[in-house]
Amino acid sequence: MNPALAFLRSDSGKRLGACLGLGVALALMTGATGRQDDYLYAIKEDLFTFHLIENLLIGVVVWLLFTFWPVIRRYLTRPGALGLLAGAMTVIVAQTVLGWYEPEDAKFSGLATLVGDTNGISALSSAFFGWLAWAQLIAVIVVGAAALVLRNRALFWVGAAMAVAAAIIASQAHKKVDELAGVVDHATGVTVAVWGYLTIAVALAIAAISTDDVARTREFVNAVLGWRPGFALGAAATALALYSLGVSSWFAPKSLNATLADVHSLFKGTSLAPIAVQYFIWLSWALVIVAGALVLVAAYFRSIILGIVGAAAAAVGLVITMISIHAITSLAANSENTYATKGPWQNLGDGAWWTCASFLALAAAGLVVAQSALKGRSATAADAAHDPSAGPRFLYAPGATLAVLGAAAAAAIFIPPTLEPSWQTALVTSIGIYMFLAIGLNVVVGWAGLLDLGFIAFYAIGAYTTAYLVGSLPVKPPFELPVLWAIPFAIAVCLIAGVILGFPTLRLRGDYLAIVTLGFGEIVRLVAVNSNGITNGPRGTEDQVPHPVINLGFVKFTFGLDQLPYWYLLLAVMVIVIIFFRRLENSRTGRAWAAIREDEVAAQAAGINPVKYKLLAFAIGASTSGIAGVLFATNVGFFNPDNFKFEFSILVLAYVVFGGMGSLPGAIAGAAVLTWLPEFLRDQVPSEDRQMYIGAVLVIMMIFRPAGLIPAKRRATELRGHGPDSAESQAVPAGGGLGGSYA
């Protein structure tokens, strides 16, 4: 037989054909000529073009990955490999989909065209946007890959140096373009590219000093965080604070782009508060240096007293920073100058918020030092006591969990103000709300193992309960309540609705339960559509659901169109819910749910009442969805039954599965990633192609990481199986298996 024909009939040949077909499909659906309504036109226009060729090459690369995956996987497990891959992908994304020039809303290719058409451009910028950008990326990848294959320490250092040089070249080339244009440009593309190159540099440097044949990411992370508990977080926070004070924009980033030093000159001679005047001259630097030094010294010597003092100094620095930035924005709000703002906290640059985040992270680092010293444990002792085969949590080093929580708190509080208004809206109405829904559905699906396809119905019940209690529906309540007082009533109504759904379905399992819950969700939506006298039918709420008002006597705050206050309200409620659910997961109820999920018959034989705990799962999950409904209703003001369609239940289920069923952090991460991705792709790819990218992410995730982003320990073990060195296999004594005998 002809060798070529034999290859085409082989499994490898069929796989190649499928991958080339994938390349053709990508070419038809993307690019300037990609049209989903006329594929023949797309084929004619793309035939023998570079666009088709590059997508066919993608298919060939996919085929090579599948064919030689066992060999490739061996190299991917080496130290530095994943860092090299992640950094390279980051740079590729930066140079293909992210913006590089804000005034023209141009991506990398668009800016390259502008640079090519501009006279007087610097040689560095001309070369970088002409050919150097992709050439240096390829060179760094080739050198890094060669170092990984050959395990050559010198090549690792060369690759790391090349990555650092590439980051500097990218930054300077972009800077010279902005200087020539004379504009303020905060494009994200160059920043992401620089971080991608620095990631490669760090990964290759770590590989150069590593003596392991296989990367031990978990052990490395815990070694860094546990060497001196709190030191890594304190060092990172101090470095970020110094960078923010020296380089970042502090005020009017779109016009003045004023740094910390510029702010002092800008408000010189005004009625600015004395403490704020001193802050922008010298006090900010002193606070960072003192707090950072105290925390780092405390961490190195494991001093409880210095750790507490360092945390207190960081807290004082945070308070003074907040007072100072409030002072300049309040003063600007009453000014008629060009830097006037709409009110306090407005028109601030990234530097102000990053400095606040640094102080909060330093305070957390000081508490980590004090906590670890009080427990009297060192990282070395923890490592000695740690048994990897027992499958512990990821952050087992002393203080590691608290350090990560401190960094996450700093990011959650102080990153949102740096986002564009559109992203702040998405953070609340999409990401935050769906994180709530994923947390609730995780109780039903992940912990109790009950497939619920009508979960969005409880979301609708919470929203409509709120609208009724505040008088926004045609039927009015006996007395109207403030919107936040509707939360306990929405929880109670959703609890009852959960019991109503759960009680008749207790005998059902699997697909039958899914169909019944699906029907329940559609019943709720259709009742809302057809009850004109109660819900106002398909038109939705009759009057606007009012914004919340928090009145504690000494302070009164009224919410409005600004989305940031809603984010902080949502964050506060979410923290309370997470703490409650975390305790619930490890309680007797949580263990009963796990037993029912694994084997209901065995659980009942062990004395667990399935009726009771299934009803609890439905009720508690529904109550969380009810809270989300309240926050959604008061944020958007007007809503209708179309906001609660069946497809949203499927989306929430996808978030839970993507993040990791049964994992509370996984459900949160899955909802955050899959609600962020469509918003990110909105301005990056054609709208008709957006779902294709999201579907590709889901398929790849389910193939290579079926347990989810942050899987539950039990589920990850089920999907991975028990290896010969696992705790389960070691639990059987020698001779204790089938056919064996005990001495």
Image: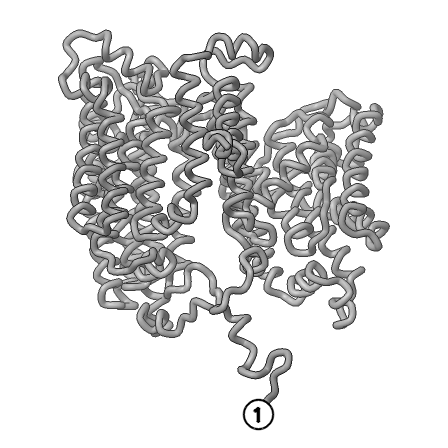
**Number of numbered callouts drawn:** 1
Residue that mark 1 sits on: 743
* Residue at image point 48% right, 30% down: 2
| Protein image colouring | one colour
Location of the C terminus (image quadrant): bottom right
What's the residue at 53%, 82% (across, down)?
734
* Closer to us: 28 or 537: 28
Q: Nearer the viewer, residue 300 or 349?
A: 300
Q: Position of residue 567 (x, y in %)?
A: 51, 37
- Image position of 617 (left or right of 550): right
Name of the residue lying farthest toward the bottom: 743
- Tag 1: Cα neighbours inside 10 Å, few (<14), some, or many (≥20)? few
| Residue 556 in the image, given as x and y percentages of width and height | 52, 38
Horizontal and vertical percent for residue 427? 50, 34
Asked which quadrant contains residue 35, the reply is top right
Q: Position of residue 244 (x, y in %)?
A: 25, 38
Question: Outermost residue toward the front?
Answer: 1
Q: Residue at point 66% right, 61% down?
A: 594
Q: Residue at x 64, y 81 (%)?
A: 739
Q: Amino acid at mark 1?
A: Ala
Q: Up-down: is 382 above or below 153?
A: below
Residue 474 in sight from this viewpoint = yes
Figure quadrant of residue 279:
top left
Q: Is residue 319 visible?
A: no
Q: Which sits in the foreground, 86 or 324?
A: 86
**Helix, strand or loop under label 1:** loop
- Judge from the rendering whether residue 721 lies leftward or rightward of residue 515; answer left or right: left
Q: Is 113 displayed left or right of 485 in the figure?
A: left
